[in-house]
Image (cartoon, rainbow, N blue to C red):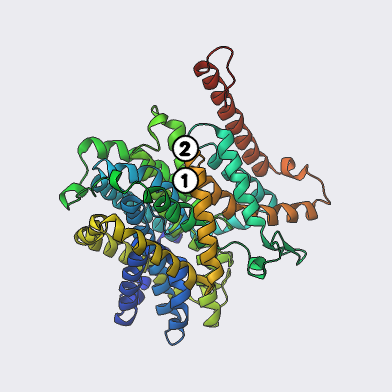
Amino acid sequence: MVLMEQAIIELYHGFGIALQFQNLVWVIAGVLVGNLVGVLPGMGALSAISMLLPLTYPLSPVAAVLMLAGVFYGSMYGGAIGAILLNLPSHPPHAVTCLDGYPLARQGRGGAALGITMMASFFAASVGIVFMIFLSPILVDMAAGFGPAEITSIMLLGLIAGSTMSQGSPLKGIGMTLFGLICGTVGTDLTTGIVRFSFGAPDLSDGVELGALCMGLFGLAYFMLQANRLADVEESPKVTMRDMWPTKRELKKSIAPTLRGTLVGTLFGALPGTGPTITSFLAYAVERRVSKSADRFGKGELAGVAGPEAAAHAKTQMDFIPTMSLGIPGDAIMALLLGALIIKGIQPGPQLIVEHPDIFWGLIASFWIGNLLLMILNVPLIGVWVKLLRVPFRFLFPLAIFFICVGVYCARNSLFDVAEVAVFGIIGAVLSKLDFPLSSIVLGYVLGPMLEENFRRTLLLSDGGFQIFLQRPVSAAFLLIGAAILVIQLYKFSTRSRRVTPRGSVPL
């Protein structure tokens, strides 16, 4: 009770900080810029924050953090719009949203998908904020108790769940995950300092660029597949403000996925070393597991949009706990936010809440202000976003490629990254033709380096013994769940193949 009263007092103080004119202006600017770059193909929070980081030098620490955080969660809203309307995820968590969001838009239900996405996002973000307020000290203690063995096991669980979410053969999903893991190993080994799999290219010493990977696989590949079928491209569906309000049936179907996705994002929120990508993939996998019509996923299922979006937004808010309290970023964007704090002479860690309460509680208060602004602004602005679909394909094609190239180039000021987009675009187009799940590649790429780092650290602590993964109860539980998912999925696929394969033929 005392903890709750203290949290309410601190939150009241945080609203006083966030609503100061000089801070509120930067919150509004951050969410607007984030929303815009989230919608634009090829742009994303990572490149936007990278470009805006030098602009924070003259700002106060509070204003700088509030603006950059606004760009982050603002791009999450905008990224969902781009994924649903244009099949272009500007941020990795929205790769899952494309799977069902874009088919819904092509079926004329894009408005309902957008409306449910905003409702689920705002609800999940609000739940994440509440947990940050009242359970921050407890969650920090739990996160601090997770060693490298536990983190390795949970990464492995995420990879298994993401692999088996693919349509058709789970073996294809596992294969694409392994391909993503290989992509994640390219570059300088942090342990030995040796450059791996660069094939003599100095630009690959820093690894494959995440933006180039995503925009090549999902953006450029899509346009390459559509380029020779201009006559078959359907007219852009019309979406009005009225269309954004879902029917009672659609709203009822989305409540349970929203709650499950929020739960997944919240449970994973305090774990260091994980970002919103893994939670959106896991939420999608959960929805397919519990659904009575799993075969509809990938063809336009609202649960495939509501669950992952809720999980990503809950995780986005909760991800600030290990970042701000432990100094452990969940992804590259969180690392940039840590860099902004360090530039201002503020060291993230357990003492941040005590030594800089204006930053921590002002940030929490700004989350509610920013999310509410995004809900209000996106409804009247939906007409602007929908007009993107009405642009003739012959104009949209080169325009989208231009934004893709500019966004990827600005992330590291490298033309080599633009070439990476072309390579992964070709790979994505070929794999899409062969019905391989591209989203599993992103999952393997994101989690691979963290899995390798924590796996090595665990073996160093155990003198090379693997028994430590089973000796620690939490790690053993994660491994058991992952093994069960893998066995069940392979069994279901094998029995399904036997039912559909004629006698005497060999299943592919």
Q: Which residue is mark 1?
A: 264
**Visible residue check, residue 135:** no
Q: CA distance from mark 2 to mark 1?
A: 9 Å
Q: Nearer the viewer, residue 135 or 74?
A: 74
Instruction: Looking at this view, name the residue that lies furthest to the left.
Output: 242
State left or right for residue 264 relative to residue 140.
Answer: left
**Visible residue check, residue 302:** yes
Q: Nearer the viewer, residue 1 or 132?
A: 132
Q: Is residue 299 above or below residue 240?
A: above
Q: Considering only order in the chain, which callout, 1 or 2, is on the residue closer to the N terminus?
A: 1
Q: Which mark is residue 286?
A: 2
Q: Nearer the viewer, residue 88 or 57?
A: 88
The image position of residue 190, as x and y in percent, is 71, 64
The image position of residue 81, as x and y in percent, is 32, 55
- Density class for disc 2 (Cα within 10 Å; few <14, some 14-19, many ≥20) is many
Three-letter code for the amino acid on which mark 2 is drawn: Val
Q: Kindly identify the residue that appears in the image at 74 percent across and 56 percent down.
A: 457
